[in-house]
Amino acid sequence: MKNINTAYYSMAETSTSTSASNKNMKGSPITNLAPDQLFSILLLLPIDSILAFSMTCKRFKALACSDTLWESICRRDWGPNAVDVLKSSNFQFQQQWMRLYRQISKLESVSCHKMTYPDGEFELPKPRASHSLNFVSDCLVLFGGGCEGGRHLDDTWVAYIGKDFEKMLKWQKVNSGLPSGRFGHSCIVIGDFLVLFGGINDHGSRQNDTWLGQVTRHETLGITLSWTLLDVGTIAPPPRGAHVACSVNNKFMLIHGGIGLSGLRLGDTWVLELSENMCFGTWREIVTCPSPAARSGHSLTCIGDSRVVLFGGRGVGYEVLDDVWLLDVSEDILKWVQIQYELPNIPGGVSLPRVGHSATLILGGRLLIYGGEDSYRHRKDDFWVLDVSAIPSISMQPTTLNSKEILAKMWKRLKASGYKPNSRSFHRACADHSGRYLYVFGGMVDGLLQPAESSGLRFDGELFLVELVLQL
């Protein structure tokens, strides 16, 4: 990295001398570098530096604005999987990666679409909340949750999403009874597998079992899903529900918090490492100081391969939170770092505190936060983008971010068009492999339809699609 920094400063000095005299350019070391060397250097620089470099001369502009370079930048910042999916899909953007990158960076709105089902007698999943919804092997997988009467569900549903998907799908019930019924569990995707942990049943019992699920598509049998209880030895996190989890580097499962025995809210962090053959796993606790306070109903999302973002939830005093914490698992010594900020400095920021929301990684390496409820149980229907890359440095935190310019980049409320779903909380959301489409199912909504719960709430069974609006 030292050599790269030297090259970068050489670029800056070269650009200054270039504007003064073209003769200086001829003797500059940077002009003697081969295009592939410059290409490698540019891929190590932030976007602002690449754009500044492109303005030094015509030769450098051609390289710094080339489609080949910007496709590589998209792979660097968004991950190779998202780029490969975009290239293989019907998504038309004339391979203008620089333009696409700019559109994603300046995302202003989303469009919602109500999902439809084929005509005929098809069974649909019951309305529910605190379930799990995942996108794996080109399928949506729905499991468990709580329904009216405080009952848990133990059913598993699968819907295939193909390349020619046009906002219509068919749910197929593939399993029941395994794992046992529960709500408030966590379920994440590692490779082609689902990993499920914990949850609460309708007797109030907390679980700490770990399950492995795998979807298989057959030409004759259709879609099947098999669940297997994972052998994790004698060490496991304490039983809990309403906790959060995420997949890290497509290798580990990370969990945090939740509601444990006797209704006690937890603040511990655990990581599950799986064997290469996915036959057994090992749990270990991550103990750091400082760390996020005990809570439930929050969100935990991994950005890139190693940076984990925790947001919101309900604390031990039943207060609804708005704090943001980061955990970089690539570091030798793991530690939580809080990103402190002042709500009044964020336009519309007073509405940010929430519990029971969803926070999903979308195209561009940012989080799309949707819904939830506040301390008065007012449910929300707003969409926010959280971009932790906008923070100049997190290594020296905690320091309070007071710059309105930085906060405006870190937090951004999006406009929503198209279908208008009910405000909701404790729903579930997941994105497809491209990160451009988000699927949202269920949750608690206002009891506008009868019969309603005595609390004025009802469980929802609606599935809708959220699309990032790109002006291409």
Image: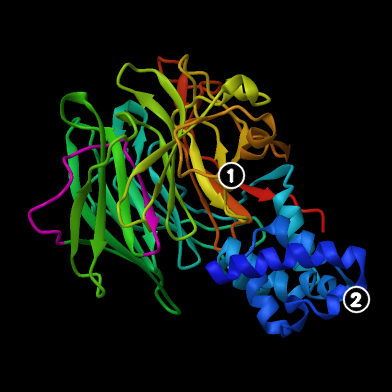
- The residue at the point 65 percent across, 36 percent down is 406
Q: x, y (%) of residue 100?
A: 75, 61
Is residue 86 visible to the viewer in this orientation of the structure? no
N-terminal label among 1 and 2: 2
Q: Is residue 470 above or below residue 215?
A: above
Residue 314 in percent (x, y) is at 38, 25
Instruction: Please identify the dominant SS of the magenta region.
Output: loop
| Residue 214: image tag | none
Q: In percent of the image, x 65 and y 70: which residue is there?
A: 7
Q: Which mark is residue 392?
A: 1
Q: Quadrant of residue 41?
A: bottom right
Q: Which mark is residue 23?
A: 2
- In this rendering, position of residue 69 left or right of residue 172: right
Quarter of the image for residue 8 reads bottom right
Amino acid type indicated by mark 1: Pro
Q: Which residue is more in the foreground, 391 or 282?
A: 391
Q: Is residue 222 above or below residue 172?
A: below
Residue 219, placed above or below residue 370: below
From the image, state whether disc 1 or disc 2 is nearer to you.
2
Query: What residue lies at 66% left-to-right and 81% top-to-bottom?
Result: 37
| Element assignment for label 1 | loop
Amino acid found under the numbered disc labelled 2: Lys
Query: For this rendering, which residue is in front, 42 or 304?
Result: 42
Q: Which residues are magenta?
A: 231-250
Disc 1: CA contacts within 10 A as few (<14), some (14-19) or many (>=20): few
Where disc 2 sits, the SS reads helix
- Residue 346 included in the magenta stretch of the image: no
Q: Position of residue 158 (x, y in %)?
A: 43, 59
Q: Which residue shows up at 46% across the image and 68% down it? A: 137
